[in-house]
Image (cartoon, coloured by chain):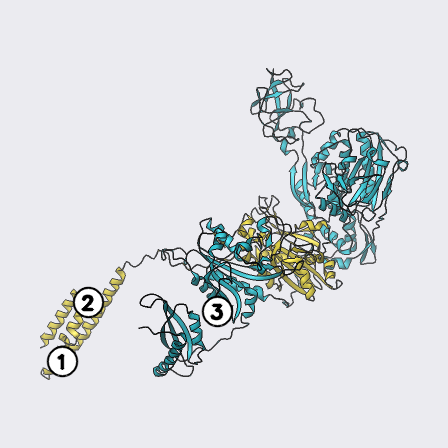
Chain colours: A cyan, B yellow
Amino acid sequence: MKVSVSWLKEYVPVEMDIYRLVDALTMVGLEVDSVVDRYASLDTVLAGRITAVSPHPAADRLKICDVDIGDRSIRVVCGAPNAKEGLISAAALPGTEMPDGTLLEKTVVRGEISEGMLCSQGELALGPDFSGIMELGNAVIPGTPVTRALNLSDNVLDIDLTPNRADCLSFIGIAREVAAIQGSALKYPVIEFPRKPVGDIFSKTSVQIESPDHCPRYAARLVEGVTISASPFWLQDRLRSVGLKPINNIVDVTNFVMMETGQPLHAFDFDQLQENRIIVRTARDREPFTTLDGKEYVLNAGMLMICDGKKPVALAGVMGGLNSQIETATSRVLIESACFSPVSIRKTSKKLGIYTDASHRFERGVDPRGTLTAVNRAAQLMVEVAGGELTAGIIDENPGKCERKRIPLSVDATNRLLGTRLNQGEIKTLLESIEFSASCDGNDGLSVLAPSFRVDVEKAVDLMEEVARLYGYNQIPTTFPHITPGGTLSSPALNFRNIIKRTMRGLGFTEAVNYSFISADASVRLGLPDGDARHQAVKILNPLTDDQAVMRTVLIPGLLLDMDRNLSKQANYLKLFEIGKVFLQKEENRLPEEIEMMAGLWTGDRFDPSWHDKGTPCDFYDLKGVLEGLFNTLKIPNLKFTKLPPDKCSYTRPGHSAAISVNGKEIGLIGEVHPQVLKNFDLKQAAFIFELNLELLLPLAPDAIKAKPLPKYPSVSRDLTLIIDNTLETHAILEKISAIDEKLVESIQLFDIFEGKPVPQGKKSISFRIIYRSETRTLADDEVNGIHKTIADRVIAFSNADLPA
Amino acid sequence: MENVIEQIHEAALEELKAASDIDALTALTVKYMGRKGRITLYLRNISTLPPEIRPRAGQQANRIKEELSRLIEEARTGIERNLAESDVGIDVSAPGRPRNCGSLHPITQVTWEICDIFTRLGFSIAEGPEVEKDYYNFEALNFPKDHPARDMQDTFFVSDDIVLRTHTSPMQARVMEKHEPPLRIIAPGKVYRCDSDITHTPMFHQVEGLLVDENTSFGELKGTLTTFVHQLFDERISLRFRPSFFPFTEPSAEVDILCVMCRGEGCRICSGSGWLEVLGSGMVHPNVLENVGYDTSRFRGFAFGIGVERVAMLKYQIDDIRKYFENDVRFLRQF
């Protein structure tokens, strides 16, 4: 809502300076976004003395004027009859944005350079006169900005109104708040008709409301014999000050009254209304309609229409129709001042995508009692600015009969909610300052009637809010809640994720956060097979871009896109991870399943760049080691990596990827990104990824740690080297050894895997170190040797192994 | 015979003086005190001396041996020290083998900070779905269907009844449905609005807060949030509570802090106003409490919502909100 301070002063004396005003309005809940000096665009229009006038060589009606603008002289081509030597006028310099929106430039007029423009009042929108250039008077010093010479100043506030304050979508509404802040009186405009109304409206027209639910009130007046023309300057100037474009005197009056009172009005050309009457009804399905801006719409059943005896003439509360708008020839005007249902207007406006100053106000709720005031005010002004005769009588169809109820307000409850110590009288005064009527009801109570323009006030708590904001939020004492031991809720899942994040940071990984939405083809680019549940994404009906069309079902594409973005910025060594949800649409129109996942990506070198390492590329085992480290920190044992069959995961490279399981339960996967997927994401560098389902992981974490006593006796170790088929996995052998029920084996470590000479082709040599220890004594060599031989023999037997030569 | 040991002694001292490295000292030790060393042999032959001089000769020889041992040891220590001191050593200025930690996203770090402050104040943490029913996102929070208040939050729709949550406030209703008052919770998480420019991203993060108790008040809301802002930013920072409107709170207040950049003078960051909006808050609307079946004659509450990106922007002086989700490591590694 734009508010010109000079217009505002019509309704309330503004005693504060502009800074105080802005702050005070903001602190009663009318947040001022900006303050603009209305005449700032005229700063480059300077007083200029015409020092010489010579004829234009190529045009009889033009003159060439030398103009002294203080620090220099400019040459201007001018066609004004009153341009003469010695005159001090207004010279607009190149760069000036003229009120009609054009940007003034240095030009050539019929072969002569013009370094500016000498302006009339009208051209600068400072007055009605277009007949000649401005005459500022001899006292003005050349070079003075015209705004200063004429003492022009008006600040225009842009107020960001919250949707509950429909009452402030008007100058009177804002003025009421200013009056309350200052403790001054609000001046309502005086409505007096210049001439006595004649005739009888009821004999000429009628209004019939067929949809009272959508239209609780409809008032109308008739003005006959008007002359359509441009509005007088004062009216145009008011509208321009708040950014409205003057159209003609009748339309301008409706806009002016809307700005003044908050009541949107519509003016019909009465002679275009068939049967000279109004019917308010809902549209028929697929009924066509052309609005006054010439656009054609097809309506839905249920949209509220204003119709004449035969056809629709306006989209109620949204926009008038082309068929009944005010034309130059219009002589009889029917003024509509109605109250429409906010929901009805909002639905129509949203459905058709038409947002107007009227619909904005109606969908927030206009004062049902304001219709009569507004229609009278408009009638008064129309007769003033367009002549004609006002027809006597007002049509006021009022099926809604919205009666306001008194709201009981407890002083004690108010103070307890706010934490204040206000007394009955103070609360009464605060409410009365904005036209609420309040009477005392016992010692503790008030009986309050909210004014009809405060459609947002229904309950006691609404009144308490009024009390709070008028008293001043910053006046309310600051106290502190009594803290009782609480914590009935906690989030172990969140804690668990936080531990993982800290650990990953410690392991050198950087946390990424990607949008939860992604392009619909992301699952295709991952090569997921048909029928994969991850194709069932939650689709967004109104995405901003195609890249954000669906909710992600897998985290990996986000990291691959991050990799692409970073590679393009020469960052080709990346260790990234992300924790976030994926969304699986299980059933239409039900909430999707949301699963907390984690994914990681490593690409580029194994080590941070340094002179110690000449760029060893990272591999599968680097990333696997990270996961092993993470699981160690999480104290989750029995982690197992099992080679993934090629058809199990479409986006990892066959033979170089593994399922991750704990206690036999699959919780994720790890592997090198499939070369085809790299191609699909335009990536030219190998990368290794993992993903973990954190919801499956969380229950595996131990609730508590129990410390074990440290061993008292020394351990003994023995090594075992085997030559086995290179297709055999080391883990299988380790498992077999672990399965041997031998109490003295404390642990088994793999310490070498070797292929190549002297190991025969197709074989590999693997070496284990077995640690033996007893809890009760120091082991003797002979005893260990015996056990070790037994173990070695069994392992050799089941793995079909050879011993090294 | 006494001359013999004296001669040996003098010769040894001469040679010791000349010995300049460890090898020479070792040779010297062997030559005089080894198994066939001159002093060793002398001592071994003492028994051949006349009995009356044997004791003195023995003592003298042993004294010389001890002295020589000590001098050799001293010389060895000296040489070793010289050697150690004259070692040019390694280039200690060359960088070590990198052992760098990674980094956590600024949103994570700020969320943690916010949650830590409120958990110290006795709040518990709750989480909930990001794809949400219209009921929880709007209706339970006193946003009727077809109300202009819904325009305050540009909504991504999944269907007529399902939306991407536009705020973390649905957690208010979800928690209250399951738990009896009194309660104090915060709910961090992602939220979505279809809006994208230099100050808006279609996804962002909030931390919701809710306190319901028998005797809480707007004054306590002010106290709690003042403490929060002071702990998060600075004890001395000025803040103000400004009337605003949210359908689910009444009275509603925006909390502004004095601009951290210009200290209230007015600058680009605060659009010249001198104040920065950091969070929205208010007393829980009785309709919201009634919707979950709470006894509004007994219980009141206050709620608040903090924009995490906004706080992180102010804390870290980040100038473009879109940087949060581009995951450029040059950006992320700064935190």
Can you tell which quarter of the image residue B141 is in? bottom right
Determine whether A498 is above or below A326 in the image.
below
Residue with the mark numbered 3: A640
At label 3, the amino acid type is Lys
Q: Does residue A748 appear to the left or right of A180 in the view shown?
A: left
Can you tell which quarter of the image residue A440 is in? bottom right
Q: Does residue B51 appear to the left or right of A493 in the view shown?
A: left
- What chain is tagged by disc 2? B
Where's residue A469, x and y in %? 72, 51
Q: Does residue B80 appear to the left or right of A154 in the view shown?
A: left
Question: For this rendering, which residue is in front, B56 or B288?
Answer: B288
| Mark 1 element type | helix
Number of numbered discs visible in the structure rendering: 3
Residues under labels 1 and 2: Cα distance?
26 Å
| Mark 3 element type | strand
Determine whether A519 is above or below A315 in the image.
below
At label 2, the amino acid type is Asp
Residues under labels 3 and 1: Cα distance?
73 Å
Residue with the mark numbered 1: B44
Where's residue B328, x and y in %? 50, 51
Residue with the mark numbered 2: B23
| Mark 2 element type | helix
* Residues behind callouts 3 and 2 on a single chain: no
